[in-house]
Image: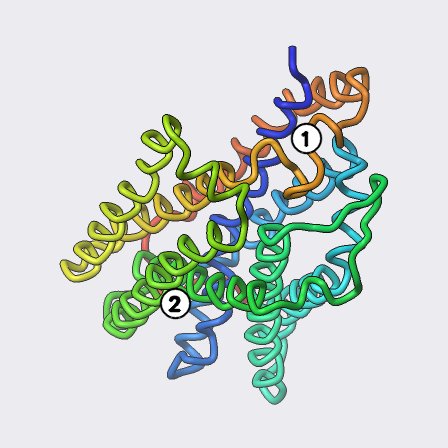
Amino acid sequence: MDYALIWYILIAIAVFAYVILDGFDLGIGILFLSAQTTKERDLMMNSVAPVWDGNETWLVLGGGGLFAVFPLAYSVVMPALYAPLIMMLLGLIFRGVAFEYRFRTKRGQFLWDSSFFIGSLMATFTQGMMLGTLLQGVKVVDRQYSGGWFDWFTPFSLYCGFLTVAAYVLLGACWLLIKMPEHYQSRYYVTAKRSAIIMVGMVAILSIWLPIRNDFIADRWFSFPQALLFLLIPALSIYLAYLLFKDLIEHMPVKAYLASLGLFFLAFLGFGVSTYPFIVPHSLTYVQAAAPDTSLKFLLSGAVFLLPLIIAYTAYSYYVFRGRLNEDEGYH
């Protein structure tokens, strides 16, 4: 049994779960200061209050799993991404503190509102920059990171940062369309449409940019016969983008949210096609970076029990707090 491949897939699932679950509440944080009243901001926070900290469980699982299961990858990726990673963690700390403190004060509430926005924007943008850094490749010599301190700061990584902001804003707007009372919704339909246009356009440019700048990615996507299969991903993406705009125009927020999740899933598949079998693109494969099989088997025996538990309590929390918000109830 290929235990390294199993863990490669499990880490990928954890990262994807974090992106789609924490993505919408980061998007809400970016939209936070656009709210027109304090009551609207209260409702925006209340829409994610029961689930936001549980969403970040997947980030811990992905990062901790990388350290335990692919220690060589961890030792290479961390030096390459120290600066944006620290900025991301600071942003998440800003968010967490602001979440608790803004309901405890009236006089200084504007400071915590700003902190919630800044933390969300910082965490989102740096996540996109880290993704861009991995996609453009990390320099490795003798199984060690050999790049510079600012290799993560490039036009390509900045572009990916802006793309991630647009994508999370789309998720956040669609979530608010599902959760907010109906008289708040008209503005979020406009926001969702605009962010969807920006995201789809930027993804299209990225899909051209990547194979131009990387021969490995170009060969993977355009070499026959696998190209016939892989090109289903952009075809399905075009179809889901059509459904997303159709659902937003027809005011069907749940379907629009599901379509946006579908686009995220296809983008994630595209990332996998562009990087497999590398866990540090395009320097270390998951086999080269994996811990010994004895360690992988031991950790897998724990994950078999832990992962279903995490999925169960996450699903249960979303089920319990389903439906639209009541303006008179919430987190205080």
Tell me if residue 94 comes above or below residue 218 in the rendering.
Answer: below
Q: In the rendered image, which quarter is residue 326 located in? A: bottom left
The amino acid type of the residue labelled 1 equals Tyr
Q: In the rendered image, which quarter is residue 265 located in? A: top left
The x, y position of residue 75, in whole percent, is: 82, 44
Location of mark 1 (residue): 286
Q: Residue at x 45, y 74 (%)?
A: 41
Apparent side of residue 32 relative to residue 299 in the rendered image (left or right): left
Location of mark 2 (residue): 328
Apparent side of residue 27 relative to residue 80 in the rendered image (left or right): left
**10 Å crowding of disc 1: few (<14), some (14-19), many (20+):** many
Pick out the residue farthest to the top: 1
Q: Residue at x 38, y 83 (%)?
A: 36
Q: Residue at x 39, y 57 (%)?
A: 203
Q: Residue at x 84, y 45 (%)?
A: 144
**10 Å crowding of disc 2: few (<14), some (14-19), many (20+):** few
Q: In the rendered image, which quarter is residue 81 located in? A: bottom right
Observer-nearest residue: 326 or 169? 169
The x, y position of residue 321, in whole percent, is: 42, 48
Quadrant in which the C terminus appears: bottom right
